[in-house]
Structures are given as structure tokens and as C-alpha cells.
Image: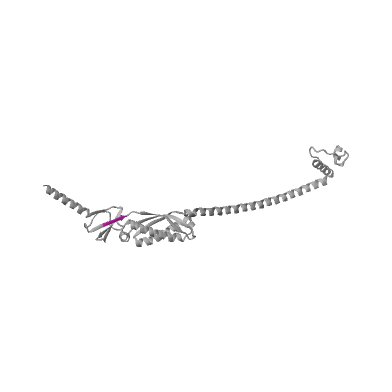
Amino acid sequence: MQRNVIVVLGVALLALVFAMNTLFIVRQDRQAIVLRFREYQRVINAPGADQPGVYFKIPFVDSVVDFDRKIIGLTLEGQEIAASDQQYLVVDAVVRWRIEDPRLFYRSAITEEVGRSRLETFARSAMGRALGSATSNDIISGRRAELMQTIESDLNAAAATALGVHVIDVRIRQADLPPETQERVYERMRSERAQVAGRIRAEGERAAVVIRATAQEQAEQTRGEGDAQRARIFARAYGRDPEFAAFYRSMRAYETALDQGTPIVVPPDSDFFRYMQRRNGGG
């Protein structure tokens, strides 16, 4: 009896091992290729191929290699780029990609890790070519969107043929100056801004001088016109009443000559006071 139990358990174990090596599952987010003695047989759940589910293979003869079917992210950090204006930049970027041809991907890279490493090499080369032909200002802000599209197209051309992958998007996350050159560039920027500020101040001072000179000239002209008008009015008034003119001139002389608190000695019969000696002012 005990021997029969052992036999049954042995058969069950062999059946389990056989089943485990016969059946395999391909999830919806994975894609697989079936190999027979390391030679390609078929692909499962790749774009345009079979759907996910449970599949059979020949035990101990067929092997299954699966890859991710989702979009995969690749981060590129700290790549130094020499722009066309000889300015060095440290660029960080992100590449989003997907395996489109698992057979070619396996033949070229075997594993996802190796494929990722090769794609990173292609991406850094494409970035160097695209960014090396642009100025630092274009990379930082001016033409960044256009440059990212150029990198994506260049990378797709290389990766599709060599790895069987499709690059969906390339994004430059950051483009900065290397730490050792930042302070030198900032100092140059400060110097340039100081020169611009000095030029603006000088232009403002020149404009102020012109404005003041023009205003002074206009004031002198207005004052001269006023004095001329005043002289004409006085001349007409003096011509109409010479006696009043003499009186007015005497009053102005008194106002000018006799300051407040200043003693002055003048003979009473002086012509200076003749209007004070005459009650009616000579009228």
C-alpha cells in the first residue's frame, strides 16, 4: 500500500513537472517569443500577433523569452554637450520607447537590460549630433522643441533598424552650465548688464541736458517776449500821460532805493522827493 502511494506521488510529481514545462502564460502587459533549440519559432502578443493567454510548448525543447509590452522610460543624466558656440552644457533627458519587434530585439540584445544600454548609447549619440549643431541659447530655450523632435527622428531611425524598438518621445528635462563655468558666465552677464545700465543712464543724462537747455531757451524767449510786451504797454502809458510816467518812475525809485531799515539822508528840496512835497503829486 505504501509503495502504491509513493508511485502515485511520483507520477503526480512528474505530471506537474511536465505540465509546468508544457504550459506557459503570457500576460496582457508582456510579449513573448518561443525558441526551439535557441531558434526562433513564433511571437505571442506582439503588435499584430497572437493575444495573451495560456499556450503550449514542447517540454525541455522549447523555451520562452518574454519582454515588456508597455511604454518604457529611459533617463539620461549628466551628458556634457558642446554647443556650436563652444559653450558646454550638462543636459538631462528622458526617452520613452516600446519594443515593436521582439524577434529583432532578442536577436540584437537578448535581454531588456542590454537593449536599454544599447538604446542609451544611440540616444546619447543622437543628442550629441542634434545639440552640437545648435547654440546654447537654442538648447536652453530658443529651439528646444525643434531639437527634441530632431533627436527623436534620428534615434528612431537607428533604434528601429538595430533593436526593433519605437521611440515615442524624447524630452530634454534640464540644460545647465557646468558648475565650474557658472560663476564665470554669471559674472560676464552682470558685467554686460552693468554696461547696458551705464549706457542707459548716460543717454538719460544727455536727454536731461537737452530738455533743460530747451526749457531754459524757451523760458528766456518767453521772458523776453514778456519784457517786450511790458515795455510796449509802458511806452503807450507814458505817451498818454507823461506826468503819470514820471510819478511811476519816482515810486519805483523810492521802492528800489529805500530798503526797509536803511537810513538815508536827502535834502528836503531834492528832486527825489518832489512828489512828496506836492500834495497832489504835481497834478
191 sits to left or right of 155: right
Is any part of residue 283 visible from this angle?
Answer: no
Give residue 75's quadrant in the image: bottom left
Q: The magenta stretch spans which residues?
A: 64-68
Q: In the rendered view, would you say 139 is above or below 246? A: below
Residue in front for this viewpoint, 102 or 230: 102
Q: Residue at x 44, y 57 (%)?
A: 80
Q: Residue at x 37, y 62 (%)?
A: 158
Give residue 170's quadrant in the image: bottom left
* Residue 56 in the image, given as x and y percentages of width and height: 23, 56
Magenta span contains residue 76: no
* Residue 240 in the image, given as x and y percentages of width and height: 82, 45
* Residue 81 in the image, given as x and y percentages of width and height: 45, 58
Quadrant of the frame with the C terminus: top right
Residue sitting at the far front: 180
179 sits to left or right of 52: right
Residue in front for this viewpoint, 243 or 123: 123
Q: Residue at x 35, y 61 (%)?
A: 160
